Image (cartoon, coloured by chain):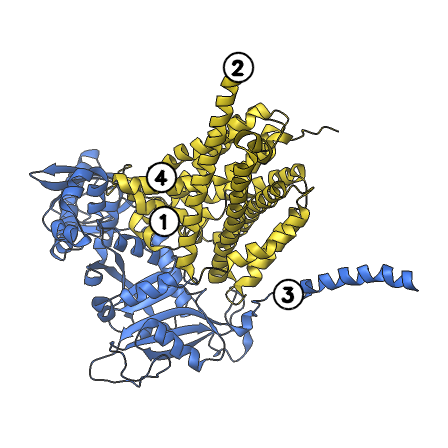
Amino acid sequence: MNNRPITTMQAVAVIVSTIIGIGILTFPRFMAEAGDSGAPMVTASGIFIAFIGFWFTASVCRKFPNETLFIFSRRLVGAGLADFLTGLIVVFFAFSSGITMRQFGEVCVSVIFKKTPIEAVILLMLLLGCLSIRRNIVKFTYIHAFYLPLILLPVLIIILVSLKEIDVLNLLPVTGNQLTPRKFTTGMLTSASLYQGTFILTLLVPFMKKPQKVMKAGASALLLIVSIYVLIVIVSVGMFGAQETLLLFYPTLETARSISLGAGLLERFDAIFIIVWVISIFTTIFSNFYMAAYAFKELARFQDHRLVASFLLPFIFGSSLLPDNVFQTYDIASATAMFGLILLTFYPFLLWLTATIREKRGRSA
Amino acid sequence: MNTHICRSLPLFLVLLMLTPLLTGCWDQLEIEDRALVLGLSIDKVAEGTHPEDDQVTHLKDTIKLPMIRVTAQIAVPGRVPLGPSSGESGGTGSQNPVWVVQVYGLTLDDAMNNLQQQISDPRYLIHLRVIIISEAFARSSLEDLNDYLRRNSEVRRQTWMLVSQGEAYKFMDVNPPLQRVPTLYILSMMEKAVESGKFPADYLGAYWSSESKWGQNGYLPYIEMRDNKNIFIKGLAYFSNGVMVGSTIPIEIGAFMAIKGIDVGGYSVLFESKAFGPIMIKVVKRFTKGSVHIVDGKPQITYKISLDAMLDEHLKESVSINTDAKLKVIEAELKEGLSKILNSLIDQTQKKHSDILGTGEKVRAFKPGFWKANIHSKNDWELLYSKININFKLDLNIRRIGLKIE
């Protein structure tokens, strides 16, 4: 039995399906806010910041291909600091799962299930996640690889169908009319914060067939995702215009609601879209929950993470019920995302720095 | 005995866990128990009449808003014919497939609440396809509609909103011979007009998008009731500053579609040729390219319009149209006539500050420097639009003349 069964393609699949999630519904609005007709450019620019964090994570993981980040970080920065930061990672991923679930519930309750209590929607999804993560990382990878085509294909079909509804004027000038450096930076950071799922690769490296290829896997995953993001923004802003996009709570959903194929033959694309989106939320929550449980297990030096998952469930559920209203939900969500962006960029950077310094010193000694 | 219980207890627990699966849908609601609103019409209440305030959502006189009258067409379950064959076999034949309910309210939402107060089934707007507003209402304010319909997750952007000459409630009660459900008749009429090049695909969503843009104003179909059962597409109702400011005549819809380059061509032009007498030309294909230049500090838009046409009718039999040269003469004459129609559309929209063509969007897209320096609100462009130059370069080709030569 091979104990490094994850192929590079599967690693790409995990990263892609982890990242594509709750954000796709609302982010065209934030992008339009930052760059009006230049929204696609603002979206694309986010990848540069996202790539920094990813590069440090991947290169430091590559140096220790047999351990996860939570183990080797103790040797690099000392057990105390490493455990503290691992704790932060647990809190971040657990809280981010909770807030993702809340956003998911908000959409479900306001668009599809108007009478179902939001708690029921959230709890069912969390239970599903909680049961699914009682598996090892290899099975975790397989589940992602299984769902990825079910997410990508319908999304691409919806994008292709909506392409014909685009008015190119809405996307010109490509640099936007009201773009200021300040707005651009905000948009770029918001866009970058959509990629924090890349951190999941720290779990994959010890099981990858060719751990040295993690950089390639992550880079191609990021490229794939940024092209999907840009396409989604092109479609929403191109269809509605930047000003109208600002008025829509869920621009991407509105796009799916507005298109039809073949003179009313297939009219309810929003139904297809919601199904796809529920799957993509599941894969996201699955990864975040797994990350939180796994990091907690490492932090507490437990044998496995299964009981941790059940133990974390009430906390995640609780955090999903914290916000009072939709605005609070989205404010907390973007604050969490910003925190994540900072944590998951600087912590890997710190590790990378110490690892590089030690390497140099080791060589000179 | 003990082992028996030990063995069956887990099984019992597993079965117990399955029970939630038997509950079915939380939000389940049979289609018979829904009041599906197919069409809505909105009128202003005439001055002088004071309909009773239903006080469903507020206390009397606590809020000052003009009253509106909303007429809803609700599908009666089981009576809406699903196919062409399910026609008059029922016997009585007079069973109306729709139920028309009229309510008054201060806002659309208030009126919908009053409506709910008097019909038993919960109302649903998921099948709302047509909204007709009266001209008087369109000329006052659409803020209420724009907000409520955008906010409501049941309403689609693919809904038609039409402006009616005169009162709108009459359209909810028409009895068209072609379709049994009046709103479906209006819907299919508009959809077919789009297919045959008689009207642009101007759904509610498209109207909203253009109203949101700084460099464009919205327009809606303008209709009129004929003989109490026919609906006549009368033109474009165009908006400025959020309210309707005017309407065009039907041929100007053709002019509008030509300037926008919306294919398939659908309008015919009847004109008096000096040499050949009255001639009808049918436009079959439209293609347009617009360009923007800044001349003397003002944007200048040039539309290069290419039209493919065919000769449809020629009255004067004494002169025949039988050579290429003669067609060219007609083309030249027609160009002049067409320019007049195009300019009449431009002139009236410029006078009313209503840029339904979206020339401002072109300026914004291609001359961002000028836009940033001069336009700081939608109103800025509405004012500037009246002063800009819009030129046309017509390229007209009469390709064929039908089956008769002479």
* Residue lying farthest to the top in this orientation: A364
Query: For the image shown, how many numbered marks are present on the structure?
Result: 4
Q: Do labels 3 and 4 touch, CB within 8 Å?
A: no
Alpha-carbon distance for marks 3 and 4? Answer: 44 Å
Q: Position of residue A191 (x, y in %)?
A: 39, 41
Q: Amino acid at mark 4?
A: Met
Q: Earlier in the sequence, mark 2 or mark 4?
A: 4
Chain letter for the blue part: B
Alpha-carbon distance for marks 1 and 4? Answer: 13 Å
Q: Residue at x 52, y 32 (%)?
A: A77
Q: Amino acid at mark 3?
A: Gly
User: Alpha-carbon neighbours of circle 4 within 10 Å: few (<14), some, or many (≥20)?
Assistant: many
User: Alpha-carbon neighbours of circle 3 within 10 Å: few (<14), some, or many (≥20)?
Assistant: few
Q: Position of residue B111 (x, y in %)?
A: 35, 76
**Which of the numbered marks, if any, corresponds to residue B24?**
3
Query: Depth check: A334 or B279 in front?
Result: A334
Residue A351 appears left or right of B302: right
Tag 4, which secondary structure?
helix
Mark in the foreground, 1 or 4: 4
Which quadrant, please, contains the N terminus of chain A?
Answer: top right
**Corner quadrant of residue B20:** bottom right
Chain at numbered mark 4: A
Residue designated by label 2: A363
Up/down of B64 relative to A354, above or below: below
Mark in the foreground, 2 or 4: 2
Residue designated by label 1: A29
Tag 2, which secondary structure?
helix
Same chain assignment for discs 1 and 4: yes
